[in-house]
Image (cartoon, helix red, strand yellow):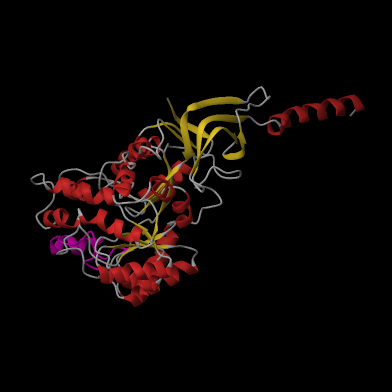
């Protein structure tokens, strides 16, 4: 091989490497950028994105010099971090008689429907969601497909199948004929006693869950009398928490009634979901333990509205939806005023996907300032997920999860319902 050919080969190799050395950057010109930590709106800022990360946040409007660099004009918009909903059900979809879907829909049917709902959620500005349980094959597969770029949707952290006691909130065989109960048997998410609870956690870990969800009380959309009664002992919940902790997982707990809430908090769960009938003792305990509260106000209002439609819910559910649903907003208000940590969550799937931002209005309506409600869906939600190094704020090194709105949400919280630009991990999914 001649010196000339070696030189030519080296030059060709350098040319092949050149795109990596001069990677394309995107410059977002932000008329107003919301610093969620300080609560201040910063004027005329530029966010620089390379690949899936933010590499700079600069004052003024700047642009790159590379041939592939591009500028996105958001100069008439308010820009904030991608939103996080800490309580959704990606496979659920509301509708009259939807309780019968388990007998008429196949896993593929759920998957195709969920793909559409996932796109609606992302276009609404929610770049990350925490899925609180469904079919642990389909929701885990949807998460994986989104992560691989095979389908479009928000980043998903999923609980797989939520864990329940026999006859409890997530026991799908509850109320069926004996023949059907015998055919279903005991699914892997049904657990009684500490040993079965430990096994159920390990099973969800094995199947690929990111987080564990349990139910310590009944709920609105099950056959329990009023949803308030405890369904797990503190010993059982502690077995779940300790096993999950050993596996590096957090535990979210569905709970409406006061005793079920307090048992779960004492046992060390990371978050209480719903918390409708939380009492003063429960609030004090949550504040003392640093337990997060994910309120889902919109779900309470939605099921109450649906219960007024004849035949929408079975007879056992209708009165609970009418009585418990409207209590959520007031319970949230008391918890916020007591200093309980709040993370944004809506229970999407109980109501229609894509209008998650309605929750902001209900939160502010209960006394939470707009900036605190936005923090609940950004920096606070990221903390609950254990993802503060990757999301929650518009800072260097974090995912380029960026949303732009028409209007100023600090003055008009309904602006959260009007996203015109959505970027997730550096890819633009909405631009108007």
Q: Position of residue 420 (x, y in %)?
A: 41, 29
Is residue 15 shown above or below 413? above
Q: Position of residue 69 (x, y in %)?
A: 62, 26
Q: Quadrant of residue 182?
A: bottom left
Q: Quadrant of residue 6?
A: top right
Q: Quadrant of residue 115?
A: top left
Q: Nearer the viewer, residue 22 or 36?
A: 36
Could you tell me which residue is drawn at 21 percent across and 56 percent down?
327
Tell me if residue 27 can be seen.
yes
Q: Position of residue 337 (x, y in %)?
A: 34, 59
Q: Is residue 251 left or right of residue 233?
A: right
Question: What's the magenta bit mostly, secondary-structure-wise?
Answer: loop
Q: Is residue 364 magenta?
A: no
Q: Position of residue 296 (x, y in %)?
A: 30, 52
Which portion, as a residue range, is magenta? 166-189
Could you tell me which residue is drawn at 86 percent across and 27 percent down?
7
Q: Nearer the viewer, residue 233 or 341?
A: 341
- Position of the C terminus, as image quadrant, is top left
Q: Is residue 375 left or right of residue 324?
A: right
Could you tell me which residue is drawn at 26 percent across and 69 percent down?
258
Q: Is residue 171 magenta?
A: yes
Q: Nearer the viewer, residue 344 or 414?
A: 414
């Amino acid at each position: 091989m001649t010196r000339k050919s070696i030189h030519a080969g080296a030059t060709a190799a350098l040319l092949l490497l050149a795109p990596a050395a001069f990677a394309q950057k995107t410059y977002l010109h932000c008329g107003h950028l919301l610093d969620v930590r300080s609560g201040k709106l910063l004027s005329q800022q530029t966010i620089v994105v390379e690949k899936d990360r933010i590499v700079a946040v600069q004052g003024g409007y700047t642009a790159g010099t590379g041939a592939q660099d591009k500028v996105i004009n958001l100069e008439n918009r308010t820009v904030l971090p991608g939103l996080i909903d800490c309580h959704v059900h990606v496979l659920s979809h509301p509708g009259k008689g939807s309780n019968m879907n388990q007998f008429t829909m196949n896993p593929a049917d759920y998957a195709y429907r969920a793909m559409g709902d996932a796109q609606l959620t992302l276009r609404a500005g929610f770049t990350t969601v925490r899925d609180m349980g469904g079919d642990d094959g389909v929701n885990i597969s949807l998460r994986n497909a989104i992560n691989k770029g095979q389908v479009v949707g928000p980043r998903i952290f999923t609980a797989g199948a939520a864990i329940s006691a026999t006859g409890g909130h997530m026991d799908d065989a509850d109320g069926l004929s004996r023949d059907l109960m015998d055919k279903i048997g005991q699914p892997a998410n049904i657990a009684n006693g500490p040993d079965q609870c430990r096994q159920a956690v390990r099973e969800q870990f094995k199947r690929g869950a990111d987080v564990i969800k349990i139910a310590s009380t009944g709920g609105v959309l099950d056959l329990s009398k009023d949803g308030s009664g405890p369904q797990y002992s503190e010993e059982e919940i502690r077995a779940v928490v300790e096993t999950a902790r050993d596996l590096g997982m957090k535990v979210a707990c569905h709970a409406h009634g006061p005793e079920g809430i307090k048992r779960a908090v004492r046992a060390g769960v990371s978050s209480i979901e719903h918390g409708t009938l939380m009492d003063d003792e429960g609030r004090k305990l949550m504040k003392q333990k640093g337990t997060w509260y994910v309120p889902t106000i919109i779900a309470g209002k939605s099921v109450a509205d649906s219960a007024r439609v004849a035949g929408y819910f079975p007879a056992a559910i209708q009165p609970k939806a009418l009585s418990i649903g409207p209590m959520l907003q007031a319970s949230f208000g008391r918890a916020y005023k007591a200093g309980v940590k709040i993370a944004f969550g809506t229970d999407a799937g109980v109501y229609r996907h894509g209008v998650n931002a309605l929750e902001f209005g209900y939160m502010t309506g209960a006394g939470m300032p707009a900036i605190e409600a936005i923090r609940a869906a950004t920096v606070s939600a990221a903390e609950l997920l254990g993802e503060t190094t990757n999301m929650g704020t518009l800072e260097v090194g974090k995912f380029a999860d960026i949303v732009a709105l028409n209007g100023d949400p600090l003055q008009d919280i309904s602006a959260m319902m009007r996203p015109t630009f959505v970027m997730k991990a550096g890819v633009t999914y909405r631009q108007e």
